[in-house]
Structure formats: C-alpha cells, structure tokens
Image (cartoon, rainbow, N blue to C red):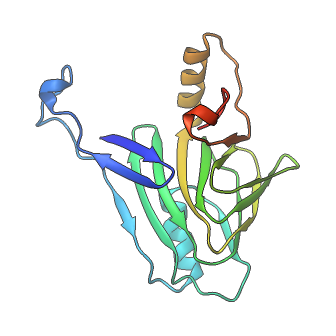
Amino acid sequence: MAVIVTLDRVRAEPPLSGAHRAGVSASQEAPTPRRVVGSGIADWDEVHEVVADAYFPHELRPLSRDDASRYRLESTPIAATVLARIGFGADVSIDTDHPGAWAINIPLSGSIASVTDGREIVSEPGQATLNPPDTPTVITNWSKSCEIIGFKVERDYLQREIDRIAGRPGRSLTRQLVCAPAPARNGSGC
C-alpha cells in the first residue's frame, strides 16, 4: 500500500500488483488491515481502550466535562509503522512511554503540549513533536480542537534507516520539526 501524507489529508493507494513486485504474486499479497472508528462512543474508558489498541498504550484523562462522543480515530498498520489520524474532541491529558517505537505527532488543527525528559514542547499545525520510545511522556494538553496525523515507527527499524541514510550509526532525532513548504524549509522540516 502506498501512503501519501500531506498536512491536510491522508490517502492510501492500492499496492503494486504482484507482477510489479519481485517474487510476490498477486495471490500472495495480503491486504493491509485498516481500522476506522468514528465518533459516537461517549465513554472515555472505551475510547481509551480503542486508541491504546490502535496507536500506543497510555493513560487518558479528560481535562473538561466534555464526553468522548466527538473523538475520531482512523489507523492503518503498514509494515513496521502505524499511520493514524486522531482527535478527541475535548481537552485531554495523556501519559505514555511509547513502548518500542517513536511517535511522531503532527497537528492538523489545535495544539498538543507535551513534556519529555523535563522539556516542554508545544506543536501546532506546521510543526511535529517527536516522542522517543520507552521514555515517559506526559501530553499535558491535547486541545479540544487538536486532530493529529500520528506516525508510529518501531525504534530499531527507524534507527537502521537513520544510520543507512546518514551513512554512520548512532545519529539521533530532534524532538520537534517545523513542517513548511519546501522553499521555506532551509534544510529542516517535515
């Protein structure tokens, strides 16, 4: 499955046919499972379980009296990654360790404030927060209007790719990226 991500949409396209992939016939290709859960569940415990199952285990705390009926989740596992679109429709706080994988959270709307290793990062549209694996993180305020594209990437897979691209092992990632149109990036960005 080819996945095209822009800051305003996510589109999944059909995979190349077996004739176009070396050694894989069309009958051997398994469809990529896709999980879509819309709003309608008003119980925060149920929303917590659904989101934890689709993205990362966590502890979820509503910060207002709003119920969970306006949450949104769409996720697709792709090899060593998960691509998700998540919104809670209420101000919430989340505690997580992002076990075994990086979480790259890119707000499409609203803001997401988090603290990792004592460092606070607030990301809004045009920015991405990179949360390291196996490190306690508190999302202190996922705003009511915040909807993200979340990208979960297994730690070892991402490190191998960073090492391969950088041409040397041990490179690390920044904790926030500025996502801007190509001409304005100045060498960094999404």
Residue 143's place in the image compared with 112, above or below, is below
Q: Residue at x 47, y 83 (%)?
A: 41
Q: Nearer the viewer, residue 31 or 105?
A: 105
The answer to whether residue 114 is left or right of residue 16 is: right
* Residue 89 visible within the image: yes
Residue 98's place in the image compared with 28, above or below, is below
The answer to whether residue 46 is left or right of residue 1 is: right
Q: Nearer the viewer, residue 57 or 119?
A: 119
Q: Residue at x 35, y 50 (%)?
A: 11
* Residue 132 visible within the image: no
Q: Looking at the picture, how far across and down is residue 153, in whole percent?
A: 54, 40
Q: Looking at the picture, how far across and down is residue 88, in whole percent?
A: 58, 73
Q: Nearer the viewer, residue 165 or 79?
A: 165
Picture quadrant of residue 109: bottom right
Of the 4 image quadrants, the one containing the N terminus is top left
Q: Looking at the picture, how far across and down is residue 121, in whole percent?
A: 79, 51
The answer to whether residue 100 is left or right of residue 82 is: right
Of the 4 image quadrants, the one containing the C terminus is top right
